[in-house]
Amino acid sequence: MVQKIEDDMIFRLSHKRSPGEVKLKSLEWAVVTQLDGEKTVEIIAEILALSEEEKISIFSHLLQEGLLEYVGQRQSRSYVDAALLDDIEYQFTLFMGPVAPVIMDEILELLGRNRTNLEMHQLSTLVELLALEITNEEKQKAFKKEMVQKILTVIRGAANENV
């Protein structure tokens, strides 16, 4: 019996069976390469741009073949703070002008998110997609550098609060 695949499940490659023992399709191999015992099903599906049907089918098949070992489920979702999103929008506006908020909202929509439910693991994807909108390569690099510094500052601040 195959258990229901949920987005917050975490798997790693099983030690009981090798992927070489099973005939796998290319997308199944791609999933196998992402199994690290830390990424959730949702994150792997996002990285590989899998549809809902592909995600369920692939993980179910890998589980059925004995290639997956269940690690656990993500305990809680951590969302990007509204103040950080405001800072990102402000910096993006410096590079793109008044159209920046519209582009940012479109990219958030593309990610299936909005300003209230963007998860922390999606932050780098947001920054990468925003940077791609900046046509000048120098400015693109400057934006990314600014964002990395901003995000690190926020992460360090959160880590210091938890100590």
Image: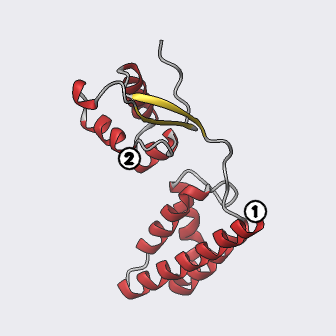
Q: Residue, x 56% and y 59% (percent of image)?
A: 108
Q: Which colour style is shown?
A: secondary structure
Tag 2: residue type?
A: Leu
Q: Residue, x 47% and y 17% (percent of image)?
A: 2
Residue 162 is marked as 1
Q: Residue, x 45% and y 74% (percent of image)?
A: 131
Residue 56 x, y percent position in the rendering: 45, 29
161 or 132, nearer to the observer: 161
| Quarter containing the C terminus | bottom right
Q: Quadrant of residue 33?
A: top left
Q: Is residue 59 above or below residue 130?
A: above
Q: CA distance from mark 1 to mark 2?
A: 33 Å
Q: Is residue 114 above or below residue 22?
A: below
Left or right: residue 19 versus residue 91 is left
Tag 1: residue type?
A: Asn
| Disc number lying in front (1 or 2) | 1
Q: Residue furthest top?
A: 1
Residue 140 is marked as none
CB contact under 8 Å: marks 1 and 2? no
Q: Residue, x 55% and y 63% (percent of image)?
A: 123
Helix, strand or loop status at disc 2: loop
Residue 48 is marked as 2
- Number of callouts: 2
Q: Earlier in the sequence, mark 1 or mark 2?
A: 2
Helix, strand or loop status at disc 1: loop
Left or right: residue 61 versus residue 72 is left
Q: Is residue 157 above or below residue 72?
A: below
Residue 109 x, y percent position in the rendering: 56, 56
Q: Badge 2: how crowded within 10 Å, few (<14), some, or many (20+)?
A: some
Residue 46 x, y percent position in the rendering: 46, 47
Residue 119 x, y percent position in the rendering: 61, 55
14 or 53, nearer to the observer: 14
